[in-house]
């Protein structure tokens, strides 16, 4: 890991400059690039004034009323990435209820990706109920270089995914800018936890079939949606749907990796930690301990994300 860090520092942010060095790097540290597809960052202002945001936003209140629930700034994420050898993180926004909070926090995401263009990929937040203002905000974020919208929280944002009048113009602008939609997902059964919510497979599936060409990433293993890929028509309908591993140790035993690979294929799974709720090191340790072929691990840790996010590393 230390070598990997050294190489990154000395070779201009993980782009090894000469073929000799590149092969040295690859053979020395088994150069699987690591892309964390699910992290959350908040501005120092939000961190400092946590209670004010708890009072003004229901989703933030659900997730962060507990003082133990960690909030991290971009610099703290970068420190974690350096510690655990994560090359790139996707910084997701949050399911804010109001347009104003979406804009305020998108500003921080946009600043962060401008500051760390080689380390961070940004996803913005919108409240689709704000109609034209939401569309304009997607346009602004796209101009600033974001690659998607999310983590959407349709339940807490009071968004009916099947409300065509609200959803169609929103999805249209995502399509126009080739943006990915990242949504929270949760299990209809099992233990409760803060933020579990009700974005269950039966809610997600009609939405997926309504917008078959939209690239959708369902967080937290899709709340069990991959199981239904055993139904051939469901598998077909999910050809543009991906699943991230965020918070996996809180939800499933490590067998989930093998099972979901069998169900949907290793090309549909994205490593995501849910930092800072779950440490990046914890998830990476879990994945490295799995008895999976090296190529499968490579796809999960970065190959699939590279393809989705159009990241070409020489
Ligand atoms: Zn989530």
Image (tube, rainbow, N blue to C red):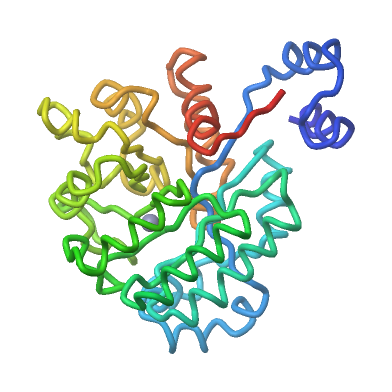
Q: Is residue 199 left or right of residue 181?
A: left
Identified at 36% across, 80% down, the residue is: 58
Q: Quadrant of ligand 1?
A: bottom left
User: Residue 212, image x and y in percent?
Assistant: 24, 41
Q: Is residue 236 above or below residue 38?
A: above
Residue 154 found in image quarter: bottom left
Q: How many marks?
A: 0
Residue 110 found in image quarter: bottom right
User: Residue 174, image x and y in percent?
Assistant: 41, 54
Q: Is residue 132 left or right of residue 229?
A: right
> Looking at the image, which residue sits at the far right?
10
User: Residue 145, image x and y in percent?
Assistant: 61, 54
* Quadrant (top left/top right/bottom left/bottom right) for the N terminus: top right
Identified at 55% across, 62% down, the residue is: 141
Q: Is residue 12 above or below residue 166?
A: above
Most foreground residue, 239 or 38: 239
Q: Is residue 53 left or right of residue 184?
A: right
Q: Is residue 107 above or below residue 203?
A: below
Most foreground residue, 3 or 120: 120
* Quadrant (top left/top right/bottom left/bottom right) for the C terminus: top right
User: Residue 114, image x and y in percent?
Assistant: 72, 57
């Amino acid at each position: 890991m230390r070598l990997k860090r050294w190489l990154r520092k000395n070779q201009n942010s993980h782009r090894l400059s000469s073929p000799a060095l590149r092969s040295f790097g690859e053979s020395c540290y088994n150069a699987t690039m690591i892309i964390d597809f699910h992290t959350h960052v908040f501005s120092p202002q939000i961190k400092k004034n946590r209670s004010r945001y708890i009072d003004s936003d229901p989703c933030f209140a659900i997730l962060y009323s507990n003082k133990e629930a960690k909030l991290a700034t971009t610099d703290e994420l970068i420190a974690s990435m350096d510690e655990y050898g994560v090359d790139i993180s996707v910084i997701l926004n949050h399911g804010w209820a109001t347009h104003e909070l979406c804009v305020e926090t998108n500003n921080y995401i946009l600043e962060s990706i401008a500051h760390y263009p080689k380390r961070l990929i940004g996803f913005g937040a919108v409240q689709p109920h704000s109609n034209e203002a939401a569309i304009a905000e997607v346009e602004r974020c796209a101009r600033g270089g974001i690659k998607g919208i999310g983590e959407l929280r349709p339940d807490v944002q009071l968004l009916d995914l099947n409300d065509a009048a609200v959803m169609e113009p929103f999805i249209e602008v995502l399509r126009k800018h080739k943006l990915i939609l990242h949504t929270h997902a949760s299990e209809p059964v099992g233990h409760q936890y803060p933020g579990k919510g009700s974005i269950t497979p039966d809610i997600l599936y009609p939405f997926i079939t309504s917008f078959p060409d939209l690239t959708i990433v369902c967080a937290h293993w899709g709340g069990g949606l991959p199981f239904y890929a055993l139904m051939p028509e469901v598998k077909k309908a999910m050809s543009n749907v991906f699943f991230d591993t965020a918070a996996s140790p809180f939800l499933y035993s490590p067998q989930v990796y093998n099972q979901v690979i069998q169900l949907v294929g290793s090309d549909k799974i994205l490593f995501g930690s849910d930092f800072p709720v779950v440490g990046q090191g914890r998830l990476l340790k879990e994945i490295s301990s799995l008895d999976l072929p090296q190529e499968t691990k490579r796809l999960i840790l970065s190959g699939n994300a590279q393809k989705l996010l159009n990241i070409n590393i020489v």
